[in-house]
Amino acid sequence: MTAPASTPADNPLLRPWTGPHGLPPFESIAPDHFRPAFDTALAEQQAEIAAIADATDAPTFANTVEAMERSGQALKRVGGVFFNLSGSHTNDAIQAIEREMAPVLAKHRNSIFMNETLFRRVDELHRRRETLGLDAEQARVLDRYHTIFVRAGARLGPEEKKRLAAITERLASLGTQFSQNVLADEKSYRLVLDGEADLAGLPPFLVEAAAQAAEDAGLNGKHVITLSRSSIEPFLQFSSRRDLREQAFKAWAARGDAGGATDNKALIAEMVALRAERAKLLGYETFAEFKLADTMAKTPEAVLDLLNEVWTPARRRAQEERDDLQAQAQAQGDNIEIEPWDWRYYAEQVRNRQHNLDEATIKPYFQLDRIIDAAFDTAHRLFGLSFEEIKDFPRYHPDIRAWRVTGSDGAFVGIFIGDYFARSSKRSGAWMSAFRSQERLTGDVRPIIVNVMNFAKGGPGEPSLLSFDDARTLFHEFGHALHGLLSNVTYPLLAGTSVSTDFVELPSQLYEHWLSQPDILRRYATHYRTGEPIPEELLQRLMAARNFNQGFATVEYLASAFVDIDLHRLTDPKDLDAAAFEKESLKKIGMPREIIMRHRTPHFTHVFSGDGYSSGYYSYLWSEVLDADAFNAFEETGDAFDRTTADKLKRFIYSAGNLRDPAEAYTAFRGRLPTPEALLAKRGLSATPAA
């Protein structure tokens, strides 16, 4: 391990990054470098903010707003590396620093956005905004800063500010502990399969992946199922050992809910209460009202209207699907009542019966490398981007890959990093993040964007094979990556994915549509052994089955969205019993007994590992209303790669960051706002499903 830095000049996080394309010097960075780097960077920004706030000259856009935008450069770099590693390649030392820094960073943010002198300067500029001669982007930055200050409590009195600061610092600590508890439960669980009887029903690709997982765990000769979705979901699909399915499913469902040191229920109760108190201090009746006021949805009522509109047909479809599964079980002599750990197993059989389609037939055609190529080719055809793999660059883990991205004119766009495989040092799920975001204020700063996945690694000499859902996840996260790579703004505050939560999923969910384009699949879905393209007849069956089990998928998602919004509509959530509340919330909507929430409350990291998706898990559905309608814009031209439509999409959505209000941005692209009909048709839940 590299020795800790004794001075800032010795610290690789604080020195200029002179490696290829300005990538962080990962191989020189040790955990001991982070705390000193944070301390130096925080002090640097504190001095910068003090100079802005205490200036004696009259406030101008340049000496106040632009100066704030230029501040904190070192903190952005240090935080960018640290928080990416804390999610994708953590260890005990990094987790300890994460716990230590969470309240420190929250306190630092409070010191900026509750700074009365600084806010007076911003407020004065905001009052005079029409007379300042600002261009549209500058006006947007000023308006966003003013909103951020007000929502952070800048207008509160001294005592209220003090209490609000204490709340946000405590919430930061609780959110960090929540996510670390979930990771600990995921990391500690292994279902060890010992002998042929335990492998009953498992296809070769899953046996190979389980053998690799066992080898990684030091259990050579055995097979291991982990709580990574790419491991446990196919196990639940194929294992004919109902006892093992139940065991694995219950462990998956019980993350953060098993009692002991990693149980999250008390943390949830405290977080919900603190959020409610925070909202009241800021003048809102509930946290949901506070959070949604700065989104497209605006109100909890608008969110519930959408959730309820989709819930009724989704629940009806799920009940029909359950009846099919029950009939399938009885037809093969399984005298059981369908339970949650049975759903995927019998659904796989029903899909095979109805569509002559099973995962073991599809998966050999979906090699990770080929799907990466498909995502890149789609970006080339839509936006003119090209991707050249870099072989020699600093890595934080041997498995990561990187590409140099250029535009249609050959100009450098940015760096894209792919971190695709599950490991115990990585939290579950899939996400996009940035080591550096695009902006022009401090120079022509090009982005460094990363996609993190949790796919099962193939065995020695074997490629990693994906399910169709895995492939869709890759396209989804790459849509986010393009939102970061194509960003074309001057001010850091507006760059890339810095948009409202219920708009940020539009570029990602929209991008998924291109995976299903037949010419993309014909070219890139090739058999990993023979190289032959996916047979046309199999392709047609795959497309015909794309809405199979959609009732289940929609219900498990919506259930999580309902519980999230219900928790945050509480006006006085004292002594909250998280388990009882979850149960009551699901009972209220008539949750089918055979399905559980996609993310149960004790491991709902979207909502409780930070404020990102709190009161905001509905955002995927809200954005899906947009993405279903947006793809129709291409279909209406008869060409999924129509140049004119793609140019508008790039200009107003993918490269525009937060230059405009989201509704204005979407209308600029489409000419109008959408209605939910396209979404229902896309999911096959409307009376006239999509062809």
Image (cartoon, rainbow, N blue to C red):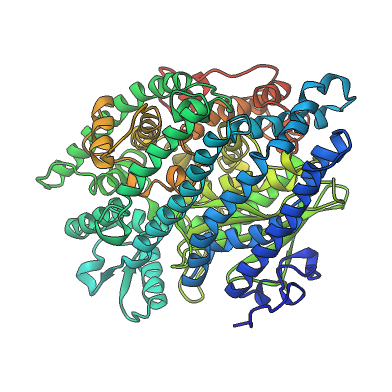
* Along the viewing direction, whichever of 423 and 183 lies nearer the viewer: 183
Q: 622 or 29: which is nearer to us?
A: 29
Q: Is residue 415 above or below residue 489?
A: below
Q: Determine the image quadrant of residue 246.
A: bottom left
Q: Is residue 339 above or below residue 90?
A: above
Q: Residue at x 49, y 45 (%)?
A: 166
Q: Is residue 526 visible?
A: no
Quadrant in which the N terminus is drawn: bottom right
In the image as oriented, which residue stretches furthest toward the front?
A: 158
Along the viewing direction, whichever of 67 and 359 lies nearer the viewer: 67
**How far across and down, in percent of the image, does residue 104 sit?**
57, 55
Residue 532 location (% of width, % of height): 56, 58
Q: From the viewer's perspective, is residue 625 above or below residue 169?
A: above
The residue positioned farthest toward the left in the image shown: 335
Residue sitting at x 74%, y 58%: 44
Residue 636 in the figure: left or right of residue 232: right
Q: Is residue 191 left or right of residue 527?
A: left
Q: Is residue 6 visible?
A: yes
Tell how many labels. Answer: 0
Q: Position of residue 528 (x, y in %)?
A: 52, 63
| Image coords of residue 36 (percent x, y) | 65, 69
The residue lying at 56 percent from left, 28 percent from top is: 628
Q: Residue at x 33, y 51 (%)?
A: 264
